[in-house]
Amino acid sequence: MKDAIASGDYRDRVLEESHWPAFADPGMEEITLGDALRRTARATPDRPALIEGRKGGRHWSYAELCRDAERIARALSQRFRPGERVAFWAHNVPEWLPVFYGCAMAGLVLVTVNPAYRRRELQYVLGKSRAAGLFVNDDYRGHDLEATAREAAADLPDLREIIPLRDIPALLDEGGPDGPLPRVDPRDAAVIMFTSGTTGAQKGVIFHHTGVANMTRFTQTRAGLRPGGVFVNPMPMFHIGSLGHAGIGSVMLGATHVLMPEWEAEAYMAQVAEHRGTFSLLVPVMIEQVLAHPARSGYDLTSLRRLTSGASVVEARLIRETRSELGATISNIYGQTEMQGSVTGTHPDDSDTDMAETIGQPLPHMELRIADPVTGATLPIGAQGEIQTRGYQNMIGYFDMPEETAKTLLPDGWLRSGDLGAMDARGFVRITGRIKDMIIRGGENIYPREIELLLAEVPGLASVAVVGVPDPKWGEQVGAVLVMRDPDAVPDVAALFALCRAELAHYKAPRLWYVARALPVTETGKVQKFRLVETIRDGTLPLLQQV
């Protein structure tokens, strides 16, 4: 990595090419997650650390959370060896946090598992990670998780122990208040998270302690979370946006983490009002639901000052409405699981244009460039290419998948994102698409992102996804899948097509138009375009009109 710049204002930088050398301020900490929790517990032992965000929910102070984590760590150290993988399969229950930090203190690697998974998916994650242990809740939305786990165990030779969450009190007693714990290095593996599956394939990404600890500190600091703040969190804990940004970020900054069982707009408003929430990470559709909720005026949301958002574009309209209606700013962030979370973010006082059209500037200690996807050469300012990162946040690799790791982590340290973007002279980055999403129509390369951004501003459209539809003549044809704000409304395809023809090159205008009730998304709000193409191919999503 090129030498980091020691000081200076981000706003003063003028780049000569699409390469952002890393900033060294503020300093990075080489710290384990366990030591981060211990430090905050010493500094503010009585501050609320974790609140179960429902009526009558449980509470932990920082001293109590640290005590429980250390007891769990001692108990786990008697059952597992440092470096072994222990999985956690449950929805948003507060047990996630003491178990997570207990694993970190014991030198174990926590494997997060989506609670919506069925037996086949569970077996894949546990088998791929060679998990030795599994914490499991009793059920999730009527699915008996524990029974499924015990059935799956028959085909998982590495899985030695299944620990129901109801047994955690016994585990706390087993660990006791005293006893040695193994030495943990800040660069040791801490977490394995499986990629979200927007392209169909899942790989286990290995994080280290220093990576996620500093990523969350830098991200939340830029977005506006402050020590003593209250982070109300409805995001799923198996994902970096929740376990990382809220579960680790709150500890790094000494904030209170209010963990909701799941997303529901009115329940979220109730938790913000009750606990005087100051900060949240919400995807755009969640913010829309809060703004549109008929009961919003009945809740005091004046404490909510800062939001972060990602997974999809945050429109200028939504940024303006959030500021005027809620008095809150939005920091648009960008990252990937392979980057241990977010690597860029907008500042709360950036212009509306920068906040709505960019993913901000890189975070401290991360180098970022726009590169030619074929040659790897750094591109001129404003040119479209692949977003690549280099620095402490890059993943250790994909677990037990060296060939896949080598495709993503290049020998010189650059990580290939697979995302397309462009950088201006100030270092602000725009997302322009996915390399795998690129449509090739009659030899012309078409990137769906610019078409989606154009259509996203059309009144009456809730969301839109542009995909390549197989075509015998053109190879691929451009298809637009629309979701209407009014489910019974019929889009004016002729007007939409005319708009695209007027604003874009003629070959980019979608010829095939579809209407869906909703777009298929991951649990974290990322559109699964491969599933849309599948429904078009098999006729599940019928063609509305061809132009």
Image: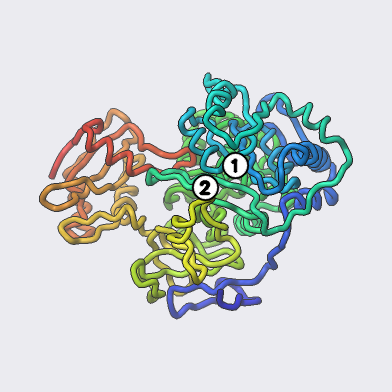
Question: Can residue 327 be seen here?
Answer: no
The part of the image, by quadrant, that contains residue 234 is top right
Mark 1 — residue? 111
Q: Residue at x 55, y 45 (%)?
A: 193
Q: Residue at x 74, y 38 (%)?
A: 76
Q: How is the image coloured?
A: rainbow
- Quarter holding the C terminus is top left
- Can you say whether 404 is above or below 465 in the image? below
Q: From this viewpoint, which residue is outermost toward the bottom?
A: 16
- Can you say whether 125 is above or below 382 in the image? above
Q: Which mark is residue 204?
A: 2
Q: Position of residue 519 (x, y in %)?
A: 35, 37
In the image, taking residue 422 as reference, residue 27 lies left or right, namely right
Which residue is more in the foreground, 438 or 124? 124
The part of the image, by quadrant, that contains residue 443 is bottom left
Which residue is more in the foreground, 469 or 352? 469
Q: Find out whether the residues at labels 2 and 1 contact each other: C-beta distance under 8 Å.
A: yes
Mark 2 vs 1, N-terminal side: 1
Which residue is more in the foreground, 286 or 373? 373
Q: Position of residue 322 (x, y in %)?
A: 51, 46
Q: In whole angstroms, how far apart are the C-alphas of marks 2 and 1? A: 9 Å
Question: Can residue 514 be seen here?
Answer: yes
- Quarter holding the N terminus is bottom right
